[in-house]
Image: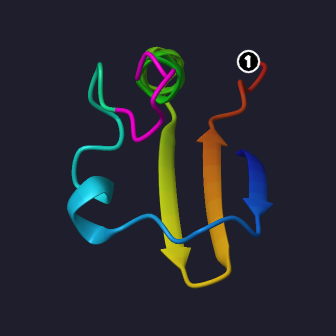
Amino acid sequence: ALIIEVADNGPEIPETQLQHLFEPFQSSREDGTGLGLWITYQLVHQLGGSIAVNSSPGETRFWVMLPRETET
């Protein structure tokens, strides 16, 4: 599998927000549309992969896991 990991040192994402993070129109930003993570989630799942997130004080980390094609 191909694993992509992205991390930042922004504020922690509250648990109540994490539960709905990949749903459309969920945004904590005043000018956000709430579509970026939803689109990412849809694309990753259409490719047969998965996406995970962990957020703690001082760090939020995302993992995108995509299957590799095998030659037959």
Image quadrant in which the C terminus is located: top right
Please tell me which residue is depicted at 76% across the width and 61% down the height of the picture: 7
Is 31 one of the magenta-colored residues? Answer: yes
Q: Which of 51 and 25 is in front in this view?
A: 25
* Stretch of the chain drawn in magenta: 27-34
Where does the image place residue 46, in percent across and percent down from the top left?
45, 14
What is the chief secondary structure element of the magenta stretch?
Answer: loop
Q: Which of 72 and 13 is in front in this view?
A: 13
Please tell me which residue is depicted at 74% across the width and 49% down the height of the picture: 3
Please tell me which residue is depicted at 34% across the width and 43% down the height of the picture: 21
Q: What element carries label 1?
A: loop
Is residue 41 rendered to the left or right of residue 70? Answer: left
Inspect the image, locate mark 1, and give the three-letter code of the amino acid beneath it.
Thr
| Figure disc tally | 1
Location of residue 37 with respect to 10 vertically, above or below: above
Occupied quadrant, residue 24: top left
Residue under numbered circle 1: 72
Image quadrant in which the N terminus is located: top right
Q: Nearer the viewer, residue 4 or 47?
A: 4
